[in-house]
Each structure stands twice: as structure tokens, then as C-alpha cells.
Amino acid sequence: MQIPETIIRDRLAADLSMLEPGLTLVATEFQLSNPDGAGGRIDVLARDEFKNFVIIEIKRSDAAARQALHEVIKYASILMRDQGIKPTHLRVIIVSTDWHELRKPFSEYLERPVCHTTGYKIRVDPTGKITHSERLKPLALAAPIEFSPTQMIYLYESPTVREYALPRAYDAMNAVGASDHVLIRCNYQGSNPQIIFPYGIYMVIATQPVIDDDDDDHFWGTAEDRLWQKFTKLEVPRDTAESGGRDCLAQMLQSGWRVEVAARSGRFEKSKGILTDDDLLDSLVNFDDASQFWMCAQATPRFDEQWTEFRRHLDAILAGNALWRGVAARLLDEIAARDPEAKISVNVYNLADTAQMLDGLVRNPMHSGHLIRFGSGH
């Protein structure tokens, strides 16, 4: 008697620790829409302890071995393209009761392409003769969502004016082309009497593609800088405005502000089913990224691409300090060699930015004397 895949799926979803510890369920039968073709349903969508999304595909037998691989490739592609998930933050687990036929195509799937690949679309006549061929143009793949290094906050003396401005800020964002954006409602609840504008709209956009636009000659800076310049010219009410970097929201929370997501747009809205508002705020406050002077991240050698990205970020932030770059590289090499399953966390302040380093030490005294700190565990 064969047990239906749906039963295996539900039993597995109830106890994902059967696969590995640290997995948490996002959804079963997660629906994917695909404007460029067939969509589908992910058997089980989960997140691991490193905040990666995990596609779990269940196959009961050998009957659909290659179909299973085709499906997971399609599902991963849709998640990356439509919901902005970075390839290094996406994993796939294939579960089967019988690997006799699946093992070989699965092993081939794990290998990287070794030569240039081209696709052609052909037409044939009733005899099988090719009557036409044309090179297949790949779909334009959207870049994964990454938070812009420049963010903006509009501040208000009155909560009424702030609420009036929120939908206008949303429309203005879309009008200037920032389709991927988040608006965060901020309320000051601290005791500092110098805070005269205790209400705010904190605005976050995704990094923008570089576009050669002759009409933008009167704007300057990066694509994000140009977008913000356009945005501030639109009629969105504000008492005052401030701009800052990606750590500004964390600094506000430490200073007595309370925040909540007010609106999401574009891929931030599409990803709402798998990335909650709390997850989004956590990503903003604890972004796994390396700024020029500061890095706070976690990774494991078990995931090759994420480990490579983690090491590249760390090496970049330690640029200019040959001693620390060498020490960090040797330490990570040793940890990976001794325990490929290790969990590595790192916090770094780069002395190149003395003001930011001192600010970090003052705000978080437990870091005093620790300009670089590693942690390893299981």
C-alpha cells in the first residue's frame, strides 16, 4: 500500500526536525503564480535558523524523478524573480521514499554547468524537417531585493498630519518608480524633551537598477539618490525630513522610538505571505550585509554560496587592515575544516570610521574593546 504524498507532507510539516534542526514551517502547498508560464505549489516552504527560505519537495517514488527536479528549479526561479529572494538565501530539499531513479539526475542537478548553454526554439513540418529556428531570449531576471543604503524619514509634530501624509507618500513612491518600497510608522515614546517631532514615516526602498536616462541630467548621485531627489519634490506633507544609512532604524529603536509597518509595495508586498512585517523589520534592523564600516552576520560552511558571500563581505570590511584580514581568513578556514556544520556569527567595527566605531561602543558597552568578535557553535 502506497502512502499518499499529502499524508507524508502533513506529517513532515508537523515535525520538520526529522530533516534537520532549526527548520520552521512557513506554509504547506504554498501557491506560486507565474505570469510567464505555469505556476505551481511548493509542498512545504520553511525557513532555517540562518533565515534562509527552504523549498521542500516531496516525491513518494521514482515515477517523477526528473519532474521533481524541474519543479524545484521552477519554484526557486519564481521565488527569486517575483519575491526578490537572493539565491544565497534560498535552499532546496528534495524528499523521496525511493532514490533508485532519482539519485543520478539529482547528482547531475548539483553540478554546475561546465560550458556555455544556448536555447533555440524550432518549428518543424509534418515530416520532421526543421523549417525555422530562432535563438531563445532568456527572461529578464529581476535582481533580488536588497535595501538601499540611503533611507529617508519624514517627521511630524502631529499624528493627524502624519496619517494624512502616509497614502500620499505611498503614491509618490510609485510615481517616481520606487515600486519596491516599505513605509514604516514611527512614534517616539522616550523621555528626551528635545524631540519636537515625535511622529514619523520611515521610508525604505530597494536598491535601484542603473538606468541611462538623459532626462535625469539635472539630478545627481546614485540611482537611489536620484529617486529621493525626485520624491522630495513631490507634494507629500512633512514638517521636516532627514536621510540616513541602513542602520538608522536600529539607532531609532535604541533611542525610544516604536515602529510598525504601515504599507508595503511591489515585491515587498508580494512576499508578505512568507515574510511577515516582523520579519521585514528584523531584516532592516539586523541586515545580514556588510556596510563599508560595520558587519553583523551569521553563516555556516554547510551552504557554499552563502559562505562565500559571507567571507567576501568580511574581507571587504577589513580592507586596509592586512593583519585582521589574514587572521579572519585563517580562522574561518580552520573552523570550516574542523566542523563544516559550524554556525559562525561575526560582529565587526572597522577602525577606518572612528566616529561610527565610537558611537557603536557608546551605544553598546558590551562591545567595548571588541572591534572584531567571532562566535562558533552548533
Image (cartoon, grey):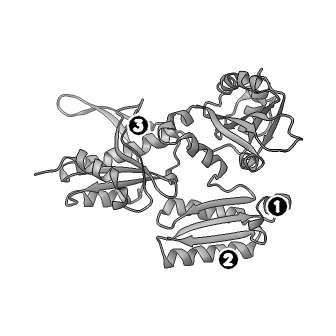
- In this picture, residue 268 sits left or right of residue 55: right
Q: Tell whether label 2 touches label 3 (CB within 8 Å).
A: no
Place of residue 205 in the rendered image (x, y in percent of width and height, measured from the top left): 66, 37
Mark 2 nearby-residue class (10 Å; few <14, some 14–19, many ≥20): few
What type is the residue that disc 2 sits on? Val
Q: Earlier in the sequence, mark 2 or mark 1?
A: 2
Q: Tell whether label 1 touches label 3 (CB within 8 Å).
A: no
Residue at disc 2, secondary structure: helix
What type is the residue that disc 3 sits on? Leu
Question: Residue 362 shows which numbered tag?
Answer: 1
Q: Which residue extends farthest front?
A: 191
Q: Is residue 340 above or below residue 235?
A: below
Question: Residue 327 shows which numbered tag?
Answer: 2
Place of residue 200 in the rendered image (x, y in percent of width and height, measured from the top left): 75, 33
Q: Is residue 225 visible?
A: no
Name the residue that disc number 3 marks.
Answer: 136
**CA–CA distance between discs 3 and 1?**
57 Å
- The mark lying in front, picked from 3 and 1, is 1
Q: Residue at x 81, y 62 (%)?
A: 357
Place of residue 12 in the rendered image (x, y in percent of width and height, measured from the top left): 31, 53
Place of residue 162 in the rendered image (x, y in percent of width and height, measured from the top left): 74, 26
Residue at disc 3, secondary structure: loop
Q: Earlier in the sequence, mark 3 or mark 1?
A: 3
Q: Which residue extends farthest right?
A: 194
Q: Residue at x 83, y 34 (%)?
A: 197
What type is the residue that disc 1 sits on? Val
Q: Earlier in the sequence, mark 3 or mark 2?
A: 3
**CA–CA distance between discs 3 and 2?**
48 Å
Q: Residue at x 41, y 37 (%)?
A: 136
Q: Is residue 321 above or below residue 278?
A: below
